[in-house]
Amino acid sequence: MGGSRRVGNDPRRKDRILAAALEVIGERGVHRTTHRAIAQRAAVPLGSLTYHFDGLQAILEQAFAHLARTMSEHYGSRLAAARDREQACEAVVDLICGPEYATPRQFVLLFEMYSYANHNDAARKAVREWMAVSRNSLAAHFPPEACRALDAMVEGWSMHRHFERDGGGPDRDLVSAAVTAVADRLG
Amino acid sequence: MGGSRRVGNDPRRKDRILAAALEVIGERGVHRTTHRAIAQRAAVPLGSLTYHFDGLQAILEQAFAHLARTMSEHYGSRLAAARDREQACEAVVDLICGPEYATPRQFVLLFEMYSYANHNDAARKAVREWMAVSRNSLAAHFPPEACRALDAMVEGWSMHRHFERDGGGPDRDLVSAAVTAVADRLG
DNA sequence: CAATAGTGTGTACAGACGTACACAGTAGGG
DNA sequence: CCCTACTGTGTACGTCTGTACACACTATTG
């Protein structure tokens, strides 16, 4: 139709494979993630992976790039909803405490990406972009110095909460106090 | 000599293997860490690994347990050197900015441990203990609430610095300001 | 309809992997 | 001295992995 180039039967297949890859990574970890596990999860034949991707490494790289993009959008949209600094602080507290950003699944994937990024340049690039975007999202509400500090707090604190995994509720006031302390002093 | 039990030729071999395992993990990542790579690095025969450990998983678990202990000691000793709150704040800034705690090698290993901990109970336990100890080290100088916040800041900020990997110097004043802001408000 | 060019798949293969285990080596007891 | 009990090693085996590739299929072109 129009173009001289043919169109595949299932143009979304590549994305489905990448989504399946993230699921497998989340359940098993990058170690023990295999072509066959991904293929089975995506319900596609094994050969389909080698047809669409140049090896397992390429799948992981693109899967993590996709993850970074998704997380960036989520992070950004939560902060873009804030209209003033007070709401921005609340948004930051939400990012740390709320179940939206800090879903266990995304945390597991995040750690897989970070560890993989230390041994793979493409993944490292994805991590850097994700970090840059998350800080830029803060930049709409805070000066650069505060962005650095708040971004670090979001990362570190939400990750500690992820591993402690008990009593997730009563922290909120404390987190809020720390966030406003930094925002006030560095703002 | 006293006991009825014989003594092996090389009692330090187990530790040497664990040290070699950490080196391999640091260079290659947990994915692509194999018995053979560890054996070669430790300069011991392949069979020695299956003799001393019940499988690769056991090696990783014990290697990470060792890592957590080492890091805890380092973290604790740096903070124990502080005599008052001001020095404690300086120590926290050092932990974030200084090259001692934040050596790239240890960071890589830390991320490997975190990601592995999401799929392995023993490693998860090691991570939790390491986090508990690091917070306890802060507890000698700050109230519990401040410990939570400062510990999160150390983790998040040092890790961001690890990935950004450019201009590591001029941050120091900013980090110091953020640390004292939190310490003052929550102290 | 025949020719064709690109899409997609099942299978086969070489290599690497974890692990078991038969065996060698050695230090004490009798 | 021999015997025994234990430590430690080299090798072999079955499995699983990544990847290539010959082949089938389909839709377009002439």
Image (cartoon, coloured by chain):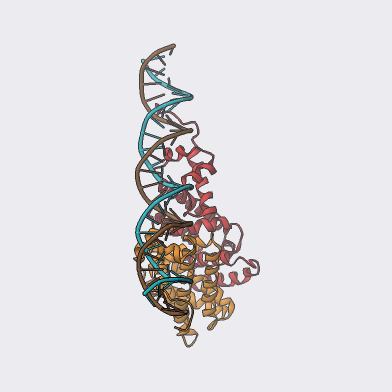
Chain colours: A red, B orange, C brown, D cyan
* Residue D15 percent location from the top left of the image: 48, 47
Q: Residue at x 62, y 68 (%)?
A: A172
Viewer-closest of D11 and C11:
D11
Viewer-closest of A40 and B183:
A40
Res. B163 visible in picture: no
Q: Residue at x 55, y 69 (%)?
A: B128
* Residue B163 percent location from the top left of the image: 41, 62
> Taking A3 as reference, is A111 above or below it?
below
* Residue A9 percent location from the top left of the image: 49, 31
* Residue B115 percent location from the top left of the image: 49, 60
Instruction: Please tell me in which quadrant of the rendered image residue A104 appears.
Output: bottom right
Give the farthest residue toward the bottom: B83
Quadrant assignment for the N terminus of chain A: top left
> Taking A12 as reference, is A112 above or below it?
below
Res. B153 visible in picture: yes
Give the total of numbered labels.
0
